[in-house]
Image (cartoon, rainbow, N blue to C red):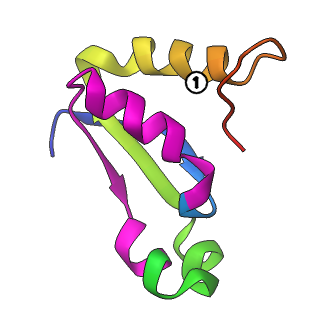
Amino acid sequence: MKNFVLVATYTYPHEYLVLKNLLTEEDIPFFFENETIVGVSPFYSNALGGIKLKVHKDYANYVKELIEKLDTPGSHLKIV
């Protein structure tokens, strides 16, 4: 996981489900650090620093733009 960089941090898994599906559909290499432990015990999220989205460095700028696009008021898909 040497070539992966932190792009975003979320508190709970439901906050990024739309984004996760988009990344999977576009075959972008990514993973969510702490996803499993927070899914099992949600109260650990703050103690662990949240669920961290890490993507391959070659895709980092694209994913940041994608997140910004999803957060705009006119978007039909939203990140909570």
Count up the numbered dots.
Answer: 1
- Quarter of the C terminus within the rendering: top right
Measured as percent of width and height from the top left, residue 9 is found at: 56, 48
Up/down of 8 relative to 34, above or below: above
Q: Residue at x 18, y 33 (%)?
A: 3
Report which residue position mark 1 lands on. Answer: 67
Q: Amino acid at mark 1?
A: Ile
For this rendering, which residue is in front, 68 or 17? 17
Q: Main secondary structure of the magenta part?
A: helix
Is residue 33 or residue 22 the one in the foreground? 22
Residue 70 visible from this viewpoint:
yes
Residue at x 58%, y 74% (from the top left corner): 45
Residue at the image point whose x is 84% and y is 17% from the top: 73
Quarter of the image for residue 29 reads top left
Identify the magenta region. 14-38
As helix, strand or loop, the secondary structure at mark 1 comes to helix
Q: Is residue 71 left or right of residue 31?
A: right
User: Taking the image as drawn, is residue 56 in sight?
Assistant: no
